[in-house]
Image: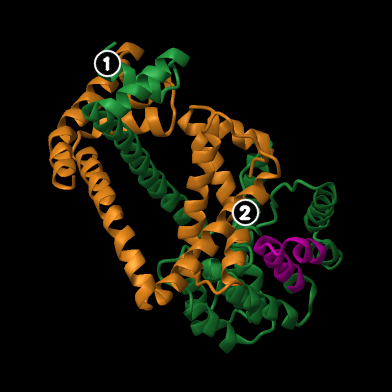
């Protein structure tokens, strides 16, 4: 396996180049899956839970690395370990909290906040369903530009489009289409819930 | 500026101080404007969540790739490809010579089948100098097939990191260096308990260790536990057939 330093991996994730990002994820997988597996299995976890926690950890890492003010103050291994450790603790805590919720006083509090969450969840589900209903090309363009942070030229090459300008135009059109599809139902939802 | 331009520039952090104040005023006094900003934020979050799910799909694929092969070896140069080709030719000759016959002994089958997959001795780079030095020492000794000496740095690496790659290498080094590989069998069983994601690989190595010990029944029991979804399944069936033919 090719060896990369921590800063290589960070640069690859920030590169705006999908092939480099995928290679970085593969490297992280090979290096650290065993470490997280050991953490979880030794702390009340089951084998089938490892994959989900590790994948969520990699997603959190990627989303953090993409932020403008990201800087690594430890090794990448320690950082990823800390993320996965927190995710696992949260999951354990959540399971415990469900037990606590049997208490009446707690249940009342939860129900109140649960209502707020429901409205928010409905809004997000609406947006999500509209993204799912977009054409495959629109989905890819929005994902590659806003999520993977690929440069226009990279998107052009990945999707085999004729020019960067075509990518720019399509990106604008896809976002407008999404906005137009979501807006009426969104307004109705907000009106119904005050 | 149009409403959408205000929102785009606000979300991209491109408003100056005076414009930011104006933006705050609009958000407080124009409910439609505040709703449009909320919609825009939800759209970005929706795309983020869609992207997270696509990344999860990709990682599921990587998981499938690696779950049957704990550490993949990749050729580093064309020279290595040639070395691999020569090794394959030697292996084919050896396989022809040792091809499982009804009278193949467990020792012959062990010699044949342990070559089926090259040992996963390509450890990942470590950030600390002392761990890196231990890795280099272990890799050097394993390359020389000095398995007994390699156990020292491997044990130290495992006690420092608790990573399965080192414990697997310990099991293989024990299997190669022990005449009766009881410790290797214990190590492969420990791997199955502590790192169940790669259980089929560890069952395969446990079966080999039983074979070296000439305990055919135990080897068959380990091989039969290998899942039919595993990449080891076909070779495990072939070895079971060879053992049945004896």
**A84 sits to left or right of B58:** right
According to the image, label 1 marks what residue?
A: A169
According to the image, label 2 marks what residue?
A: A82
SS of the residue under disc 1: helix
- Which chain does the numbered disc 2 sit on? A
Q: Residue at x 52, y 48 (%)?
A: A58
Q: Residue A36's image quarter?
A: bottom right
Prevailing secondary structure class for the magenta stretch in the rendered image = helix
Callouts 1 and 2 close, C-beta under 8 Å: no
Instruction: Give B135 or B96, whichever is nearer the viewer.
Output: B135
**A91 sits to left or right of A74:** left
Q: Position of residue A147 (x, y in %)?
A: 40, 34
> In this rendering, is residue B145 above or below A144?
below
**A191 sits to left or right of A153:** left
Q: Position of residue A80 (x, y in %)?
A: 60, 50
Q: Colour of chain A?
A: orange
Task: Return the mark for residue B90.
Answer: none
Magenta span includes B235: no
Res B234 seen here: no
> In this rendering, is residue A63 above or below A180?
below
Q: Colour of chain B?
A: green
> What's drawn in magenta, residue-wise?
B155-174
Question: In which quadrant will I find the N terminus of chain A?
Answer: top right
Separation of marks 1 and 2 at Cα, in angstroms? 41 Å
């Amino acid at each position: 396996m090719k060896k990369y330093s921590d800063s290589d991996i960070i640069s690859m994730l920030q590169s705006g180049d999908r092939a480099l990002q995928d290679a970085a994820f593969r490297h992280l997988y090979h290096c650290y899956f065993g470490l997280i597996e050991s953490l979880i299995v030794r702390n009340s976890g089951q084998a089938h839970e490892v994959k989900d926690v590790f994948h969520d950890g990699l997603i959190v890492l990627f989303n953090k690395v993409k932020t403008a003010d990201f800087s690594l103050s430890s090794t990448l291994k320690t950082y990823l370990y800390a993320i996965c450790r927190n995710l696992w603790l949260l999951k354990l805590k959540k399971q415990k909290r469900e037990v606590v919720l049997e208490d009446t006083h707690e249940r009342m509090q939860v129900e109140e906040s649960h209502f707020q969450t429901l409205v928010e969840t409905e809004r997000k589900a609406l947006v999500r369903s509209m993204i799912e209903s977009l054409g495959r090309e629109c989905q890819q363009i929005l994902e590659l530009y806003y999520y993977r942070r690929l440069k226009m030229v990279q998107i052009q090459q990945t999707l085999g489009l004729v020019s960067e300008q075509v990518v720019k135009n399509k990106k604008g059109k896809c976002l407008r289409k999404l906005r137009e599809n979501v807006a009426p139902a969104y307004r109705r939802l907000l009106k119904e819930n005050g | 500026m149009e409403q959408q331009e205000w929102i785009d520039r606000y979300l991209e952090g491109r408003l100056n101080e005076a414009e930011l104040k104006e933006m705050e005023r609009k958000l407080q006094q124009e409910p439609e404007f505040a709703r449009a900003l909320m919609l825009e934020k939800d759209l970005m979050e929706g795309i983020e969540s869609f992207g997270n799910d696509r990344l999860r799909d990709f990682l599921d694929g990587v998981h499938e790739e690696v779950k049957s092969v704990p550490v993949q070896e990749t050729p580093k140069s064309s020279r290595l490809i040639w070395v691999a080709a020569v090794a394959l030719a030697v292996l084919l000759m050896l396989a022809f010579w040792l091809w499982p016959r009804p009278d193949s002994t467990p020792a012959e089958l062990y010699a044949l089948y342990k070559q089926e997959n090259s040992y996963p001795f390509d450890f990942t780079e470590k950030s600390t100098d002392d761990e890196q030095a231990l890795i280099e020492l272990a890799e050097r000794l394993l390359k020389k097939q000095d398995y007994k000496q390699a156990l020292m740095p491997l044990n130290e690496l495992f006690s420092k990191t608790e990573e399965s790659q080192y414990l697997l290498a310990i099991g293989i080094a024990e299997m190669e260096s022990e005449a009766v590989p009881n410790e290797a069998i214990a190590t492969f069983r420990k791997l199955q308990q502590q790192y169940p994601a790669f259980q089929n690989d560890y069952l395969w190595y446990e079966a080999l260790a039983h074979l070296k010990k000439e305990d055919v029944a135990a080897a068959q029991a380990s091989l039969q536990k290998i899942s039919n979804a595993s990449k080891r399944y076909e070779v495990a069936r072939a070895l079971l057939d060879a053992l049945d033919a004896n």
